């Protein structure tokens, strides 16, 4: 599946041909996870509206929820000003995190809000 | 400024010693920008509550808003499950994007919501 040439021209990839993808939940605004994409993963995401990423460790594409059932329906995709990150606005089925947490950012708080 | 050893032990950095930082606006939930940090940038952010990043192109630290006045007050910092991305919950003064846009993701829509 080949990525639209106009979009491909605006992307800025790292040395491995990858760029970041941030998935944000539509209903809550929660930032759910950050993963990697390459052109093919983005192309598949745009065509299928299923969040599709590239696993550096496994060296393969993965469709979010394909094994867990925790699918992501992609409402919107936006590219940032310097072309190296896409933002996906999604409806998340079940937990977004492989730990079972709603979001990958739920567990580890490095800094808490100041108490007034 | 040295980063807390427990936090440093949980971070997973890329070959350049960097990890991603996503800044999200507290009031609106908008994802504003994604930039890079290293241990020092995170340490300064945690200590000062001012969003502080590392510029790969300039090879230096930058405090968001130091030149533009568009400062980020950092309410919360969270680390994701695999330790390679931090999420900053911020109050953003003025525009977060260097283009003058509210968010770095405002301008370039790759996929729009389906119309019912």
Image (cartoon, coloured by chain):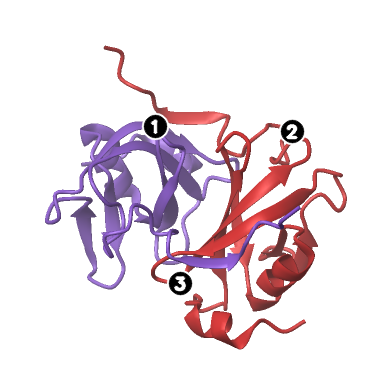
Chain colours: A purple, B red
Where residue A94 sits in the image (x, y, percent)? 23, 47
Where residue A77 sits in the image (x, y, percent)? 40, 35
Marks 3/2 in contact by CB < 8 Å: the verdict is no
Residue A65 can be seen in this image: yes
Task: Estimate the spatial distance between the alpha carbons at disc 2 and disc 1, rounded to whole Å.
Answer: 27 Å
Task: Estimate the spatial distance between the alpha carbons at disc 3 and disc 2, rounded to whole Å.
Answer: 31 Å
Marks 2/1 in contact by CB < 8 Å: the verdict is no
Tag 1's secondary structure?
loop
Q: Residue at x 61, y 63 (%)?
A: B36
Residue corresponding to mark 2: B100
Residue corresponding to mark 3: B83
Q: Nearer the viewer, residue B75 or B55?
A: B75
Which chain does the residue under circle 3 lie in? B
Q: Residue at x 46, y 56 (%)?
A: A13
* Residue extending farthest top: B116
Crowding near the residue tagged with mark 2, few <14, some 14–19, many ≥20 C-alpha atoms within 10 Å? few
Asked if both marks, 2 and 1, belong to the same chain, the answer given is no
């Amino acid at each position: 599946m080949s990525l639209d040439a106009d979009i491909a021209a605006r992307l800025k990839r790292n040395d491995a041909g990858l760029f970041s993808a941030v998935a944000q939940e539509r209903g809550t605004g929660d930032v759910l996870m950050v993963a990697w994409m390459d052109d093919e993963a983005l192309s598949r995401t745009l065509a299928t509206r299923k969040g599709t990423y590239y696993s550096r460790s496994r060296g393969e594409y993965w469709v979010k929820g394909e094994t867990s059932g925790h699918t992501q329906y992609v409402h919107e995709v936006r590219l940032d000003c310097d072309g190296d990150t896409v933002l996906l606005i999604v409806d998340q089925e079940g937990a977004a995190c492989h730990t079972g947490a709603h979001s990958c950012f739920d567990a580890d708080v490095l800094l808490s809000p100041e108490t007034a």
